Amino acid sequence: MNTIAIVDYGMGNFHSVARALQAAAPDADIKICNTAQGIDQASRVVFPGQGAMPDCMRTLNTSGLRDAVLRAARNKPLLGVCVGEQMLFSASEEGDVDCLDIFPGKVVRFAGPQFATTPTPAHGPELLKVPHMGWSPVEQVQDHVLWQGIPDRSHFYFVHSYYAVPSNTDLTVGVSHYGSRFTCAVAKANIFAVQFHPEKSADSGLRLYRNFVDWNP
């Protein structure tokens, strides 16, 4: 049985992720897990997150699940979502906190309000608001099995004020644009992580979840 653990450390839209996974992969055994044992026993792990980074890191540490997430990142397919993606990096400007340091790099804030670097033909310079919220196209800058069946520049749903800047650009497999290009998907070995919300991204998001369920890195 393909068992998927959704890490429940108290800061994430776990039930929305679970419903989307159930729709994408009705044959999988999906569990919202708040114990290290549940995460260790799963065949693959989804690591979501939402809210302020200091709160997310504090609750992850006090939940007793930090080491289980680190173990999963070493030995089984892991999908990071939104702040769950950001937490994989070394540190965040939000609250100046250390993160899990699985990927080298820092999480930084959009510099807004600001004018977009590329004016729109109809309206001239575009004033950007923070957070970046809504549908944006994602450019697939590297081939990856989790992009299978998802057309390049498909739209995904974003809600965020911060984004990850990898120290190693080879980690970047997807980019989007908000004022300027930014990394919105990273991957290495058994880890794939995205800034957007697949569970809020209609058919493209469901296809990404389905691809993750079938992924054997």
Image: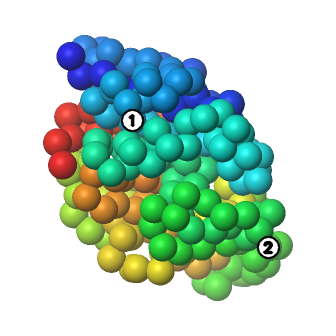
Task: Report the amino acid beneath label 2.
Answer: Gly
Marks 1/2: CA–CA distance: 34 Å
Relative to 3, residue 101 above or below:
below
Q: Name the residue under label 2.
A: 112
1 vs 2, front mark: 1
Relative to 49, residue 135 above or below:
below
User: Which disc number belongs to residue 216?
Assistant: none
Q: Mark 1 points at which residue?
A: 45
Q: Tag 1's secondary structure?
A: strand
Q: Is residue 132 left or right of residue 170?
A: right
Q: Position of residue 8 (x, y in %)?
A: 58, 28
Is residue 111 visible to us here?
yes
Q: In this view, does 149 lie to the left or right of 200?
A: left
- Circle 1/circle 2 CB separation < 8 Å: no
Query: Residue at the spot x=20%, y=34% of the render?
Result: 214
Task: Report the amino acid beneath label 1.
Answer: Val
Q: In this view, does 109 lie to the left or right of 45?
A: right
Farthest-out residue, left:
216
Relative to 212, residue 115 above or below:
below
- Foreground: 86 or 17? 86
Say few, some or many: other residues with alpha carbon within 10 Å of mark 1 (under 14 / 14 to 19 / 20 or more). many
Q: Where is residue 62 in the image (x, y as percent from the top left)?
A: 70, 38
